Image (cartoon, helix red, strand yellow):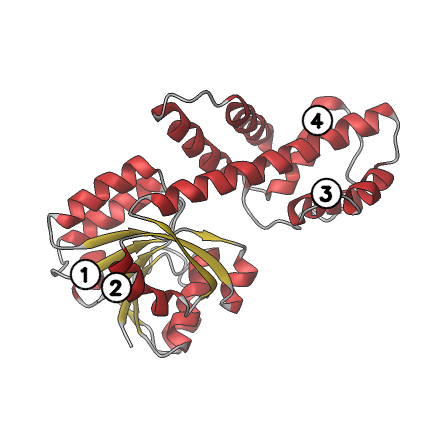
């Protein structure tokens, strides 16, 4: 059993991950940023609260980070390095920019610390159930060391390549996902304004190759269910922005990526950023005059 530190245990994904690691018998130490209510059960179950990231690093073999994005990861790593001992492994499960990840990997290596990118997919429901998917970018020896720990909160652990590959593949995954969600919301608005029965559209797509879980989550908005995909719209916007940055750094045109990012940005500007991604349908109502969500 490893001595594990966790930054971000109060988050929607981090809480379930930390809970399952603790339940598997690992020693767990956490930092508490703001929301103490979200970690009260972890502390009651035996987790130890540390006063700072540096103290957390000093007491841990492995530290998991699960926060909003690269700026928060960078701040967490800098705070930890003051107390990090050689041999520490830092695992970033956030959705981060590959360029930032590369810089942090070099920074940590200078302190004898291994920095691993291991972002997640699925939702907070699977996080609580210990059934996340994890995509790991690491050398084989590092992956083999981490895999048994990752299986404490993940159903599927994918070794997707060397260092950096995890965050790159995560951005590709999230771009494709948001392209589907944004295209569905737009199609609903056009279809409703054109006078078609959207329930018939859903029935047709549900029986064919276009169907997928993301489409079904968006389709639930037609029945007034706005939480079929529990992922904040502003986080989706951030992830697609990271994807367009990646494409730009490779000098590859990102016509679809920029369109998806702008669609999310418009929805956020219209006041839906703190809602879940299915609220793209509400943004389309405002833009087009369509009537989609029953009220």
Q: Disc 3 to disc 2, how far (Cα)? A: 42 Å
69 vs 30: above or below:
above
SS at mark 2? Answer: strand
CB within 8 Å, label 1 to label 4: no
Mark 1 surroundings: few (<14), some (14-19) or many (≥20) residues within 10 A: many
CB within 8 Å, label 3 to label 1: no
SS at mark 3? Answer: loop
Kindly identify which residue carries mark 3.
209
Kindly identify which residue carries mark 4.
286
Q: Which quadrant holds the N terminus?
A: bottom left
Kindly identify which residue carries mark 1.
88
Mark 4 surroundings: few (<14), some (14-19) or many (≥20) residues within 10 A: few
CB within 8 Å, label 1 to label 2: yes
Q: Disc 1 to disc 4, how far (Cα)? A: 50 Å
Kindly identify which residue carries mark 2.
62
Left or right of 19 on screen, residue 286 = right
Q: Earlier in the sequence, mark 3 or mark 1?
A: 1
Q: Earlier in the sequence, mark 3 or mark 2?
A: 2
Q: Disc 1 to disc 2, how far (Cα)? A: 6 Å
Count of numbered labels shown in the rendering = 4
Q: Earlier in the sequence, mark 1 or mark 2?
A: 2
- The disc placed on residue 145 is none
């Amino acid at each position: 059993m490893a001595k594990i530190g966790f930054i971000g245990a109060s988050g929607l994904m981090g809480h379930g991950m930390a809970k399952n690691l603790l339940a598997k018998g690992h020693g767990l130490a956490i930092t508490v940023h703001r929301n103490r209510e979200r970690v009260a059960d972890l502390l009651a179950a035996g987790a130890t609260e540390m006063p700072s990231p540096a103290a957390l690093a000093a007491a841990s073999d492995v530290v998991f980070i699960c926060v909003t994005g690269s700026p928060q990861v960078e701040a967490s790593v800098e705070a930890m390095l003051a107390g990090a001992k050689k041999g520490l492994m830092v695992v970033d499960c956030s959705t981060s920019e590959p360029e930032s990840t590369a810089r942090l990997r070099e920074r940590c290596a200078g302190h004898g610390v291994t920095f691993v990118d291991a972002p997640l997919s699925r939702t907070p429901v699977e996080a609580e159930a210990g059934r996340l998917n994890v995509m790991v970018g690491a050398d084989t020896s590092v992956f083999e060391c981490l895999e048994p720990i990752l299986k404490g909160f993940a159903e599927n652990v994918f070794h997707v390549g060397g260092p950096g590959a995890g965050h790159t593949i995560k951005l590709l995954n999230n771009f494709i996902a948001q392209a589907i969600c944004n295209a569905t919301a737009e199609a609903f608005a056009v279809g409703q304004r054109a006078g078609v029965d959207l329930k018939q559209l859903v029935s047709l797509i549900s029986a064919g190759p276009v169907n997928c879980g993301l489409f079904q989550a968006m389709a639930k908005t037609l029945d007034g269910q706005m939480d079929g995909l529990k992922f904040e719209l502003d986080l989706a916007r951030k992830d697609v922005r990271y994807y367009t940055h990646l494409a730009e750094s490779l000098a590859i045109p990102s016509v679809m990526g920029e369109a998806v990012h702008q669609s999310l940005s418009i929805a956020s500007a219209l006041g839906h950023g703190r809602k879940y991604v299915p609220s793209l349908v509400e943004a389309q109502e405002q833009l087009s005059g369509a009537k989609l969500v029953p009220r």
